[in-house]
Image: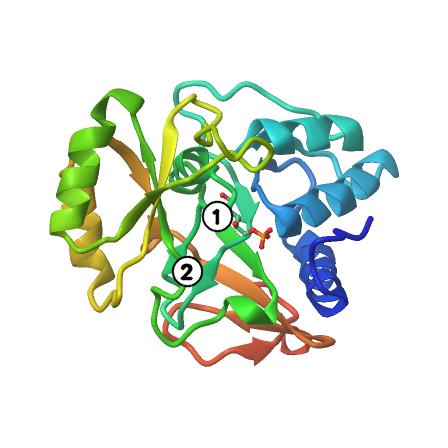
Amino acid sequence: MQNPVLSQQQNQEKQLVAAAALRWVQDGMQVGLGSGSTAAYFIFFLGEAVRAGKLRVEAVATSLVSENLARQAGIPLFEPRKGTRLDLTVDGADELDAELRLIKGGGGALLREKILATASRRVLILADSSKVVPQLGRFPLPLEVVPFALPWVLDTLEKLQANPILRSDRQNTNEAARTDQENLLVDCHFVQLPDPAQLARQLEAIPGVVAHGLFLGLAHTALVAQGEQVLVYKPGEAPRSIAEFIELP
Ligand code: 5RP
């Protein structure tokens, strides 16, 4: 079950937080399933618990890849309806700061990830130790862009000094990467990202940008692995060991 692209420590840390996240899942919950390697470990562990009859849940996934993983793991999937509020979404992140502001979308699933995070009562983020930063901005900020709008989106991004780069498909690098919605991905390389909220507003004002990877005020809790320890992060609070919690925050 190891992801061969990651270091052994990263793999171990991702598995550690993914297993710990099961404590947040209660019987009968409707759960949002994130995307990426850490979320994949969570889907695997959740599937084990479901198949063993320890948990009954139904889920909706943030990407077609995660949807397939959930199916293989034996997690029942459901079709969201008007009025659906998920009890919990569990997802990874590319970066997080002490306020639990996030950069997401490294795997290209940012639009559905934001939709499910917004439709959830609680959002739990899982991260290995490499993801915590003092200030967001080291990781390129992904945007999902409607293909028709690309030239004008790139012009506007250049004015914002975003140093935008159209993401290539991993398998066929001559082709542009496509999202599950068949849109394009643009990675922005800002030199600095001092005011994420202002930048989010600027990006949301660009016609054709369907989603940006800044997740502000959406995450309630993060589990971050530091070696063999799991730390619980809440926005603006000092991280505490998971061992301190009887009631889960
Ligand atoms: C996908 C994401 C992922 O959550 C993010 O890229 C983290 O991935 P990983 O768990 O593989 O480090 O935002 O769009």
Residue under the image location 46 percent in, 32 percent down: 177
Q: Is residue 160 above or below residue 179?
A: below
Residue under the image location 26 percent in, 53 percent down: 163
User: Which is more toward the observer, 27 or 215?
Assistant: 215
- Is the CB of mark 1 within 8 Å of ligand 1? yes
User: Which is more toward the observer, 33 or 22?
Assistant: 33
Q: Amino acid at mark 2?
A: Phe
Q: Is residue 54 visible?
A: no
- Is the CB of mark 2 within 8 Å of ligand 1? no
| Residue 106 tag number | 1
| Residue 77 tag number | none
Q: Amino acid at mark 1?
A: Gly
Number of other residues with Cα within 10 Å of mark 1, as a class: few under 14, some 14 to 19, many 20 or more: many
Percent position of residue 112, x then y:
44, 33
Q: Is residue 186 above or below residue 147?
A: below
| Residue 139 tag number | 2
For the residues labelled 2 and 1, the Cα–Cα distance comes to 9 Å
Percent position of residue 153, x then y:
19, 35
Q: Is residue 190 visible?
A: yes
Side of 157 relative to 184 (left or right): left
Residue under the image location 43 percent in, 22 percent down: 181
Looking at the image, do the residues carrying marks 2 and 1 touch, with CB atoms under 8 Å apart? yes
Percent position of residue 95, x then y:
45, 62
Q: Give the colour scheme shown.
A: rainbow
